Image: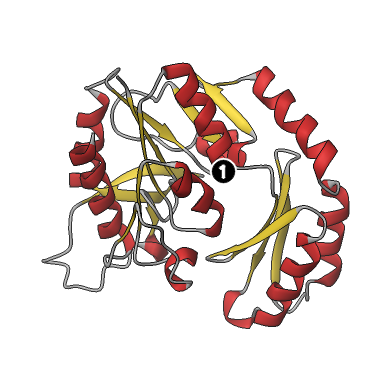
């Protein structure tokens, strides 16, 4: 029976230069593999050890199915080149898009959008509130993604914590949730979840066991729905002290946590 491994990517398996967290002499630092290039510049990395382990798991298909589960849009996800063959399935836009062999599944997309229309305030209202209440002193960029959710890129040191709390309270009453990840403030509809899309992949593949990992509030549902899960020692969940009986809270941070997570996947599968 198939084991399905569904993992967040950014700050869980792959890391930007700023997020590597390698506070050690260069002579002791692990060798890194670049897995994303954007505008001719290297952008994201994992350790070579993690890359080899991930590629090794890919060779065990169909007994093990690796499913990236990311908040990135399909276009942003398409920039990543993970080791091994491309995954058959990928969850993008926080569950709003299910890619099958790199192509968006239209039936899943339609199902998600019907539910959002029925249960949540419209994106335009939430985006308008985000922008109108943000202060230009710390707002760097504002974006919508896949016509599903909105986010701001902010100057994190100057971002007022009360503003984030007030935004979360405002959004909650409209069926939305707020997550602060690095320099980004996300506003995402509550029914838009990675776990729902992963459950659909598990149904299609007949998976008997689901393993998962993630670092942010938007990953909590994914971790709770898994049989076993891991979270790194950094990120939104770690800062809140969040865990669950079947979730292993790692002490390691940065790209070394990513390596530890892939090793756990390999051992657990």
Left or right: 31, with 136 as reference point = left
Farthest residue in the left direction? 27
Q: Is residue 132 above or below residue 195?
A: below
> Percent x, y for residue 184?
60, 62
Left or right: 127, with 98 as reference point = right
Task: Residue at 28% x, 27% y: name it.
Answer: 84
Q: Is residue 202 above or below residue 140?
A: above
> For numbered disc 1, what is the local secondary structure?
loop
> Percent x, y for residue 227?
36, 41
- Depth check: 189 or 253 in front? 189
> Percent x, y for residue 203?
49, 21
Task: Residue at 68% x, 18% y: name it.
Answer: 107
- Depth check: 75 or 120 in front? 120
Left or right: 148, with 126 as reference point = left
Task: Residue at 73% x, 79% y: name it.
Answer: 137
Residue 160 visible in image: no
Task: Residue at 73% x, 41% y: name it.
Answer: 148
Quarter of the N terminus within the rendering: top left
Residue carrying label 1: 72
> Percent x, y for residue 172?
76, 61
Rendered image quadrant of residue 255:
bottom left
Residue 83 visible in image: yes
Q: Is residue 125 above or below residue 129?
A: above
């Amino acid at each position: 029976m198939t084991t399905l491994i569904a993992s967040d990517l950014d700050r869980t398996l792959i890391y930007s230069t700023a997020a590597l967290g390698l506070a050690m002499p260069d002579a002791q630092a692990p060798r890194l593999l670049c897995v994303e290039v954007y505008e001719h510049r290297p952008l994201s990395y994992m350790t070579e050890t993690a890359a080899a382990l991930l590629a090794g798991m890919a060779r065990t298909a169909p007994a093990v199915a690796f499913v990236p589960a990311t908040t990135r849009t399909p276009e942003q996800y398409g920039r990543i080149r993970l080791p091994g063959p491309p995954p058959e399935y990928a969850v993008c836009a926080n569950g709003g898009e299910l890619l099958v062999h790199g192509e968006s599944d239209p039936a899943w997309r339609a199902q998600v959008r019907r539910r959002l229309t029925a249960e949540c305030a419209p994106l335009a209202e939430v985006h308008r509130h985000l922008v109108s209440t943000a202060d230009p002193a710390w707002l760097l960029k504002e974006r919508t993604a896949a016509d599903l959710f909105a986010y701001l890129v902010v100057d994190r040191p100057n971002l007022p914590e009360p503003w984030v709390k007030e935004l979360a309270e405002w959004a909650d009453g409209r069926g939305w949730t707020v997550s602060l990840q690095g320099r980004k403030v996300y506003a995402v509809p509550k029914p838009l979840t990675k776990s729902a899309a992963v459950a659909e992949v598990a149904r299609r593949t007949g998976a008997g066991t689901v393993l998962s990992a993630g670092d942010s509030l938007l990953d909590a549902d994914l971790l709770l729905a898994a049989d076993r899960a891991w979270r790194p020692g950094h990120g939104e969940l770690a800062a809140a002290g969040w865990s669950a009986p079947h979730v292993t809270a790692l002490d390691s941070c940065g790209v070394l946590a990513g390596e530890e997570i892939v090793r756990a996947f390999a051992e657990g599968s």
